[in-house]
Image (cartoon, coloured by chain):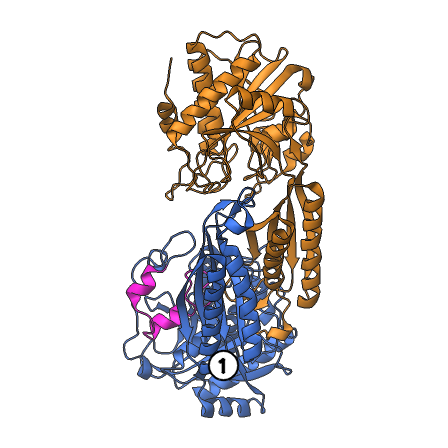
Chain colours: A blue, B orange
Amino acid sequence: MTATFAELWNGIAPIGRARNGGYLRYALDEPELVLRDWFRNQAARRDMPVTDDGNGNLFAWWGDQWGHDAVLTGSHFDSVPHGGGFDGPLGIVSAFLAIDEMRRQGRVPRRPIAVVAFVEEEGGRFGVPCLGSRLLSGAIEPEQAAALTDREGITFGEALGGTPAGRLPGLTGRINALVELHIEQGRALEVPVGVASAIWPHGRWRFDFTGIGDHAGTTSMTDRRDPMLTFAYTVLAANKEARLAGATATMARVEVEPNATNAIPSLVRAWLDARAAETGTLDGLVDAVIKRAHDRAGRDGTEVAVTPESYSAEVTFEKPLATRIASLLGDVPILPTGAGHDAGVLSAHVPTAMLFVRNPTGISHSPAEHAEEEDCVAGIGALARVLGDLT
Amino acid sequence: MTATFAELWNGIAPIGRARNGGYLRYALDEPELVLRDWFRNQAARRDMPVTDDGNGNLFAWWGDQWGHDAVLTGSHFDSVPHGGGFDGPLGIVSAFLAIDEMRRQGRVPRRPIAVVAFVEEEGGRFGVPCLGSRLLSGAIEPEQAAALTDREGITFGEALGGTPAGRLPGLTGRINALVELHIEQGRALEVPVGVASAIWPHGRWRFDFTGIGDHAGTTSMTDRRDPMLTFAYTVLAANKEARLAGATATMARVEVEPNATNAIPSLVRAWLDARAAETGTLDGLVDAVIKRAHDRAGRDGTEVAVTPESYSAEVTFEKPLATRIASLLGDVPILPTGAGHDAGVLSAHVPTAMLFVRNPTGISHSPAEHAEEEDCVAGIGALARVLGDLT
């Protein structure tokens, strides 16, 4: 079979799409389960048997399954709430089409190739990003992952149907390399395809601001212990500290109890997403935000508790591999990114590389995320060349 | 029958109570429907026929139904999310028990008495507080009320089972007076029972802060148009302006799209609750907050749209009635409140008065809301005396 990019892309575009054009594709929830069926179907059409690693990650094989020295390529299906359709799925669609291209050229790889769909890359459902690759590589304990809950109290273990299998035995020997193709998420790439150099260290911290719930109409301003004030100050402080540090800090998710117009909250829970080029800068930024939150809480009569929820150390992709790929593709740019990826998690264990496809506006995690079809087709061609070179 | 306060109170205490002790009693939703059944049951035990005004308000009659010159007493069942159990239900329970007390004393009222349960007083489900009394008195159009939606998109008309009937014809002649007993919600009442003098003018304004949704990790601080910043600044500005004005301003309800840790929001929607002793002060406060929100939006590259959702003009309860009641009860205090009530809405049309029962901490709209049993019993005695005097 020889499918075109448009055929495959249009086939998955309606799955989990909301009225605003954004996607609601959460790990192991209905639309993502439909996409996993689509994955199995695409694999079957290409005579590629599918295996599951017991962690929720899927692998479609061209060649020996988990023998030795496999080259993996793929990405993830899940989205952030109302995210774009490219972040993740483009890497899986491109992987299948790159294999089609290699077969059309009559290539017979010396190493097994697997198309991979990692589970819960965004952390949008269970809170920990790159959960599938963390499990596969042993960066999180299976029991700890199993106990993670979504907003409705369903655990990852329940959604998966059991405790995850955890680290793949013999991981390093079994995987020769992982190449993840992904839409670029900044504005730095001005040609169709580029190669990743590094991922900034980044993490998530949960802030629980607690005060005293009371009536908004009858409680004088001086009698209040309103945690919304402490939260608001922390949002602005995080913004200022990130600008000073040349880093990024974002507080974009908030839960308020009771979240009623006429009731001073008893709890405001919010998450800080912080990233920087250097680990020292990141740590200093987070410390400064936490200190300012505590200072303000003292003035508001509220309390703050901060819980680190995930931390991803700085990733530098293997430089010889990145250089070789960039050269192979005609000296395309090599650039860093602030976004976390499964390839970043696995880079601690196996050689990994990433191909970026141009994003004209740089917008991502939004319904407005977009890549031009001709750039996507260029990305598939580039991935086929890289896989050919690696196998 | 002669029930005690504890018997009736313990009978309704478990209905709609959450694990934190707060109540989830929303208008025309399951627990409130159970309380409405309880109302019909209590009325039946007292041989009091129940009528419905077609707006969702219930009336249990001792004497002629809607003939002429009735004295109404009661309050509401609905709560704010995780609110206390006293705000509303205390007035209904006390009304039934005050009638028991009058009958025990062998009183035969010359005027009809009705115990009333107003619908959607908090505005917790459909957004407009005192919706039942506004409909009854013609302060809101039935079609407008019917179209109000809850957070799940269900309209008030759907929940009610049709378009509300609207203003009661001949309202003024049919109602001689309304006396609403309510738990005090500030810290100003230091004896068991007091009488209301006035309700501060107050209202709700919806702020839609819009920006550009984007990736939290790959969008530089200078490229952002993050509406969370504009919201946070507005929260702090409202607090400062209210303190300067000697008024109250609260932003306690927030909805974020997409509300994901790693996605800069495209929309932050928040509600301002503002109240002041004087209309001019209130208007000046709200204008100042709106101006500061717009100023900040200009700096953040975001936009703000402000929609007034409800406005309650200053209410001064009929002074001769308040004075007479305070005197009758032994010169109890007469005090104003920042909280809105159905009695305030109806005060534009019929003589109304309110009895307040002491609240030791002043906390309300919170699971910690509380009144002592002996103060509640004192309130019932006071209400019985007032009803006896008025009928």
Q: Is residue B204 left or right of residue A25?
A: right
Residue placed most toward the observer, B287 or A5: B287
Q: Which residue is drawn at 59% across and 82% down?
A: A193
Query: Which residue is pictured at 65% across the width and 75% down the height?
Result: A360
x and y, in percent, of residue A39 in the image: 45, 65
Tag 1, which chain?
A
Relative to the observer, which residue lies in front, A180 or B188?
Answer: B188
Quadrant in the rendering for residue B152: top right
Amino acid at dot 1: Met
Q: What stretch is highlighted in magenta?
A: A121-148
| Residue B111 inside the magenta-drawn segment | no
Percent from the top left, x then y, of residue A361? 65, 73
Q: Is residue A131 magenta?
A: yes
- The relative height of residue A386 versus residue A289 in the rendered view (above or below) is below
> Residue A43, how many percent across, how many down?
44, 68
Residue occupied by mark 1: A354
Q: Is residue B321 visible?
A: yes
Q: Is residue A87 above or below residue B11?
A: below
Instruction: Classify mark 1: helix, strand or loop.
Output: strand
* Mark 1 crowd level (few <14, some 14–19, many ≥20, 10 Å Cα): many
Residue nearest the viewer, comparing B106 with A181: B106
| Residue B164 shows in this picture | no
Q: Where is residue B357 in the image (x, y as percent from the top left)?
A: 47, 30
Q: Nearer the viewer, residue B182 or B46?
A: B182
Position of the C terminus of chain A by quadrant:
bottom left
Vertical relation: B355 (above or below) A122 = above
Q: How many labels does the image show?
A: 1
Q: Pick out the residue farthest to the front.
A: B331
